C-alpha cells in the first residue's frame, strides 16, 4: 500500500464504456480511488452499490469515485448494467495501476496461494497527493466510511 503524503501515480485506463481516463483529468477534485478483486462477487457488489447509492453525496462534496479491477471493459459494462452503477469503473487488465498503487499481492483462500488484488481505498486530494490509505477495507462499510472522511 502506498503511504499518505505520496504523490498518487499517474494512470490512463479505459472505463466500462471504453472511454480513457487519466488521474490528471480529475485535478482540482478529490478522488476516491478504490481497488477491488472482481466484478459481480458478493463483497465487490456491496462495495460498488454502496458507492453508487452515495455517489450524489460524493459529488456534492467535490469528490469523484473511481473503481479499478483487472476485469475487462466488457465485464465492467455487464457489472454496471446489472447493478445500475452510477460512477466510473476502470479496467486494468495489464495491472499497470494495480501494481503502481501496490495492491497486487499474494493471497490465500481455501489453503491455496495466488496473486490478486487486495481491496484497498485511497483518498487523493485536489493536487494529486494521497491523503488517506486503507488496505483493511470492509466492502460493505467502505462507501460510508469514505463519505465521512470528506466531511
Image (cartoon, rainbow, N blue to C red):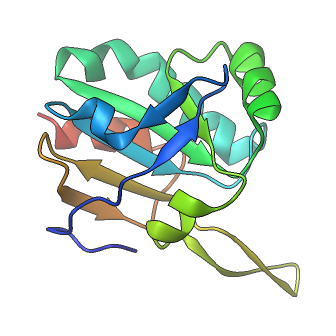
Q: Specify whether 59 is left or right of 88.
A: left
Q: Is residue 11 visible?
A: yes
> Eyeballing the image, is 103 above or below 79?
below
> Eyeballing the image, is 48 above or below 69?
above
Quadrant (top left, top right, bottom left, bottom right) of the N terminus:
bottom left
Q: Position of residue 123 (x, y in %)?
A: 27, 49
Question: Residue 132 is drawn in which quadrant?
Answer: bottom left
Instruction: Residue at 66%, 25% (x, y): give it.
Output: 16
Q: Specify whether 143 is left or right of 69.
A: left
Instruction: Residue at 20%, 69% (x, y): give it.
Output: 6
Q: Nearer the viewer, residue 138 or 22?
A: 22
Q: Position of residue 79 (x, y in %)?
A: 75, 26
> Eyeballing the image, is 49 above or below 8?
above
Q: Position of residue 73 (x, y in %)?
A: 74, 33
Q: Position of residue 14 (x, y in %)?
A: 60, 34
Q: Is residue 119 visible?
A: no
Instruction: Residue at 36%, 54% (x, y): give it.
Output: 10
Quadrant (top left, top right, bottom left, bottom right) of the C terminus:
top left
Instruction: Residue at 34%, 54% (x, y): give it.
Output: 122
Amino acid at each position: 500500500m502506498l503511504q499518505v503524503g505520496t504523490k498518487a501515480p499517474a494512470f490512463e485506463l479505459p472505463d466500462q464504456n471504453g472511454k480513457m481516463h487519466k488521474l490528471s483529468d480529475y485535478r482540482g477534485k478529490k478522488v476516491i480511488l478504490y481497488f477491488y478483486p472482481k466484478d459481480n462477487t458478493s463483497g465487490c457488489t456491496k462495495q460498488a452499490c454502496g458507492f453508487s447509492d452515495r455517489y450524489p453525496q460524493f459529488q456534492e462534496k467535490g469528490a469523484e469515485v473511481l473503481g479499478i479491477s483487472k476485469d475487462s471493459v466488457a465485464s465492467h459494462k455487464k457489472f454496471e448494467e446489472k447493478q445500475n452503477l452510477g460512477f466510473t469503473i476502470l479496467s486494468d487488465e495489464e495491472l499497470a495501476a494495480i501494481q503502481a498503487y501496490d495492491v497486487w499481492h499474494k493471497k490465500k483462500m481455501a489453503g491455496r496461494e495466488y496473486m490478486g488484488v487486495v481491496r484497498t481505498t485511497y483518498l487523493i486530494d485536489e493536487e494529486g497527493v494521497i491523503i488517506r490509505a486503507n488496505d483493511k477495507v470492509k466492502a460493505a462499510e467502505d462507501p460510508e466510511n469514505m463519505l465521512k472522511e470528506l466531511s
